[in-house]
Amino acid sequence: MTVVALMGATSLFAQTDIVAVFQQGLGNAKTGNYGEAIAQFQEVIDASWDIEEPDANQQKAIAGSKKFVVTCYNKLGVAAFNAKNYDEAINNFSEAANLAEMYEDIAAMNKNRSYVGQMYQAKGADAFNSEDYATAIEVFSKGYQADPRNTEMALNLAESYFKSNMYQEGMKICTKISQLNAEKYAEAIATAQSKMDMYTNNEVAKLQMANDYDGIIAMAEQLDDAAMAAKITMQAYYGKKDFNKMIELAPAALETQVTDEGRSDINYLLGVAYNEKEMFEQAIAAMQNVTAGNNVANAQAVISALTQSAQ
């Protein structure tokens, strides 16, 4: 009898008080009493499970509670951020994002996930600026997981990896940045590409000084950027003076390239390989395809020299 009575009371509450509790939650939310408002909105949501056919007012209370409980967690996150309590802000924004996902509010979910990323970015800034890259990696990695489109933080994460001699990890982040929408993220993509070029050149230079061309090839095999990997591999085989391998790899290497400069670089290396093998007609043909990038003048010089020799 007691159990039945309690169940009846719960059902009666759901039917008669759900709208009133929602209104109380709104009142607390308006005055900034977000903790109490959250409890009241959650009470409405919990009680809604006992209502088989909610009337119009109850439906509004339920829907409103799901919306405003997310808003209240967001407000708590903002307050914590303003107080520079980043951990508390992260917890509140994360809860807002999780609830928004549960209630299928995709816009609110994305917004709060973005805020989570921003909190991690702010939290990791001191470590990054003081060159404590181990801590920066730990913090930025969590933020990047929450919001991979926060490119400023992603670039800082990549830089932290590079500065920690974690080349492959930094390259993975930069490659993912380079795959974002080219129009929307043009500046970040350019910066990521610049980092990839610089740190790759540094890694290649270290291995070249040790005459470790096989190490360069192994490094290239681990890269997610197929175009860069192909070019590095071609350069490594040039260092090994394996011109036949360069000629063999060139067609596939050209297919990986997505820019005129990239295709020109491969054609230049191919022309060099043909020239070394004294296959001068093929060398000239390859060099004629060098139309962009840093090797255009060199290619023209080779063409001119080979043409004069043939005469």
Image (cartoon, helix red, strand yellow):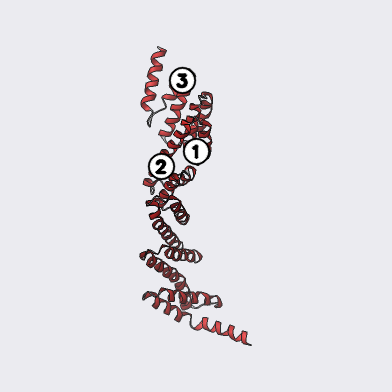
209 in relation to 29, above or below:
above
Q: Quadrant of residue 38?
A: bottom left
Q: Which residue was labeled with disc 3?
A: 275
Q: Is residue 258 visible?
A: no
Instruction: Pinpoint residue 291: horizontal percent, then vertical percent.
Output: 38, 29
Instruction: Pinpoint residue 103: horizontal percent, then vertical percent.
Output: 49, 67
Which residue is located at x 48 percent, y 40 percent? 225
Instruction: Pinpoint residue 121: horizontal percent, then vertical percent.
Output: 40, 56
Q: Secondary structure at mark 2?
A: helix
Extreme bottom residue here? 1
Specify the amino acid type for callout 2.
Answer: Lys
Q: Which residue was labeled with disc 1?
A: 226
| Number of residues whose C-alpha sits closer than 10 Å to that of mark 1, classed few (under 14), some (14–19) or many (20 or more) | some
Extreme right residue here? 1
Q: Which residue was labeled with disc 2?
A: 195
- Which mark is first along the chain, 1 or 2? 2
Quadrant containing the C terminus is top left
Instruction: Pinpoint residue 115: horizontal percent, then vertical percent.
Output: 41, 60
Q: Nearer the viewer, residue 208 or 6?
A: 208
274 in relation to 251, above or below:
above
Q: Nearer the viewer, residue 202 or 95?
A: 202
| Number of residues whose C-alpha sits closer than 10 Å to that of mark 3, classed few (under 14), some (14–19) or many (20 or more) | many
